[in-house]
Image: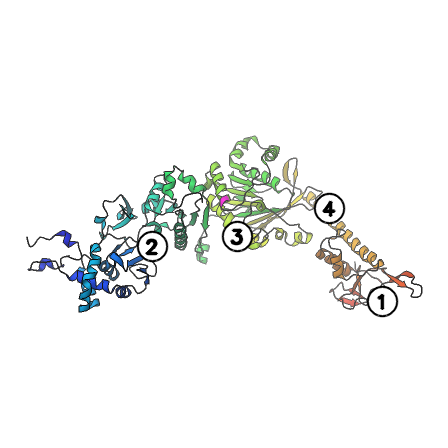
Amino acid sequence: MSNVIDMKDFFNFNTAIPQNCFESTAPWEPSEQVSELKARLLYSLKSCLSYLLPGGVFQRNKFYVGDVQGNPGQSLVVELEGNRIGMWHDFATGEGGDIISLWAAVTGKDTRSQFPEILTDISQWSGERTKSVYAMVSEIKKKHEATQEEEGPELLGAPTARWDYFDEANKLIACVYRYETDSGKQYRPWDVKTCRNRAPNPRPLYNIPGILKAKTVVLVEGEKSADSLMKHGITATTAMFGANAPIDKTDWESLKNKHEIIWPDHDEPGRQYADKVSLKLKNLGVASIQILQIPENKPKGYDAADSDAEGVDLEDFIELCQKKTISINKMVPAFTLGQLLQDDSPMPSDVIAPRIVTPGGLLIFGGAPKVGKSDFLISWLVHMAAGKPFLEMKPANPLKIFYLQTEIGYHYLRERLKQLELDPDVLEQISNNLVITPQTRMLLNDEGIAKIVQTINDFFDSKTVDLIVIDPLRNIFDAGDHGTENDNNAMLFFLQERLERLRHQVNPNAGMIVAHHTKKITKKLLEEDPFQCLSGAGALRGFYTTGMILFRPDETKTPRQLMFELRNGGRINNKWVDKMGGKWSILEEESERLVNKRYGEKLDTERRRKHDIILQLIYDEARKGKLYTASQFCKAFENRSGLGGQHSIRDRIDVLATKGYIKFCKTAARKSKYGFLCVEAMDLKETKVDPATGEETTHFQPILPTHYKSAEDGSIITLENLSVWFYHD
């Protein structure tokens, strides 16, 4: 019958019926038009590709370009020689075909509904055929006979797997089919909306309905790995075509504000894909990003599906696997003045009042070695876990506390705890609320954070933890290659990338207490700024919400001073505390005055000792024939005779000069600004040799000062009467 169409011919570009065939009264016969136009394109293939995709490059026998839009890259490949000349394949999308289908894809035309327009475009570009073209047609046809037909699913056999993609409303939007061929696995997408064998634009993520319900999502390479996780209750997703997915053509919006864990395949392409997609997610605005670092002993290409096949507990694997954390550049929160003034909501309750530890706050608890920080902390935390006040510090309620203690061994820890006088009524509650580690050797790096989080989860629902305590910072400090704890940049890295990450993974609203050693506190620092004695103080003081220092002025006495520095509250007066009868208590005001008096007497005694030593040394050295300028004396006697460092000696010399105990002799040292140091009744040893007999005689020449230091303005003034010595105190 003349009006019956052979469907095999209809789906073949070379013999397809013209689209207006049903309006024609003449019978239709297969035409040579398509074959001839294809021959022209193949004959001028390089010119054709340069016209269609000017951004591509020719390398050997192939043409490379990023995609059908002409973007730079090597995802789309066109064969330039052999029996597959003109055939193309986009490895990112799985699309491909012959040169005519490439023309259609580049120009945005549909090969089924717009086929005549495609042929017209090609004809207009190629122009009228010439005799030279006729001579080549036969040869090109022979080379192309094996690939005349466009490869389609019907030539791949039945699919061996299918994965369905759904949108936010749980409606089917795309499918991906897997085929097993002689050359390996091949995948073909199906766009439900357009009913075409292509990926939707933009490409959706797998398991969108599940993503929307979850807080944490695991991103893997491929639907098979995602299904392996999902069947164990772990929310997972993948981009269409896995690591080959074009990142910029994928819709990642459903991952916004989610905690993202990337599980790459264990190979170089997987690692590269993880790095690229993490950058995309970082700019998208996810809550956090971690990349699993697959153990090196796993085989190449190892993925979640392989792990599931081995019978591995996937939740444990994800939890314990070392992770690389990507820093998130979140939008800086900001509010108008009106918003702040109009917000009448109640203030959050202090974790420990008054403003000692606030929700999400950090308290640095400093003190010199052996001052009793750990003993103080243990007693303090026991009271907080029981909901009882301690030295006027009050918890909002019985607190759940994790205490990472790294110095005291198990047996000595339990000995200390048994020495505490615990109230039997609250002992059971304390037992459940306070978890303490014995002496632990570890660093707070990525691996250490994972271990601590796992330990906390073994004892608590981590989101209920009120307080995380670390004692001391020095034992667990890790800043990578950034430096030591005394380096402000290294300390800032540790605070942001270690402590804050730990808090975030446990409970973002938990308070933190970190015990930290201080340098020696001098009287000057004690009076002016004791918190500057903390190691890495520059970074710490700009980061913590509360500073607290335990200081013992007299090493021979037990009373200690407890000092506070608050960022979010009023001033707290310093307290004098002591441990008496096994309990820490605040000393009465009279006791405080007595401690201050004794400490002041101790300092006065020390000053007098150094005062006497310096004057005596200057006198004794002169009788040995040695005179010193102030600078020379500081260097010569640094850390000798109990005088301390150069700066400490120089300070004492300045005080003694101001009070008139030390004056200066400038006639003997003309190049010195002040001259030699001179004290009262000082003699200089001189030795003379008789030139005739060679006999040595020793006598002492009195050294009289020529200048003194003004007690009013510190200037150096010439003495009028050298023989009169006067003092200013």
- Amino acid type, mark 1: Asn
Which picture quadrant has residue 317?
A: top left
Residue indicated by mark 2: 246
Query: How far is disc 2 from disc 4 in space, using C-alphas?
Result: 76 Å
Mark closer to the observer (1, 3): 3
Instruction: Rate crowding at label 1 as few (under 14), some (14 to 19) or many (20 or more) other CA atoms within 10 Å.
Output: few
86 and 51: which is toward the camera: 86
Mark 2 vs 4, N-terminal side: 2
Identify which residue is drawn at 77% across, 53% down. 610
520 relative to 313, above or below: below
Residue under the point 70% across and 47% down: 596
Task: Please tell me whether residue 382 is drawn above or below residue 489 in the rendered image.
Answer: above
User: What percent of the width, then of the height, locates residue 321?
Assistant: 45, 43
Whole-angstrom CA distance, mark 1 to mark 4, is 42 Å
Residue 158 can be seen in this image? yes
Point out the stretch of residues depicted in magenta: 438-447
Res 348 visible: no
State the residue position of label 3.
493
Give the number of the mark in front: 1 or 4.
Answer: 1
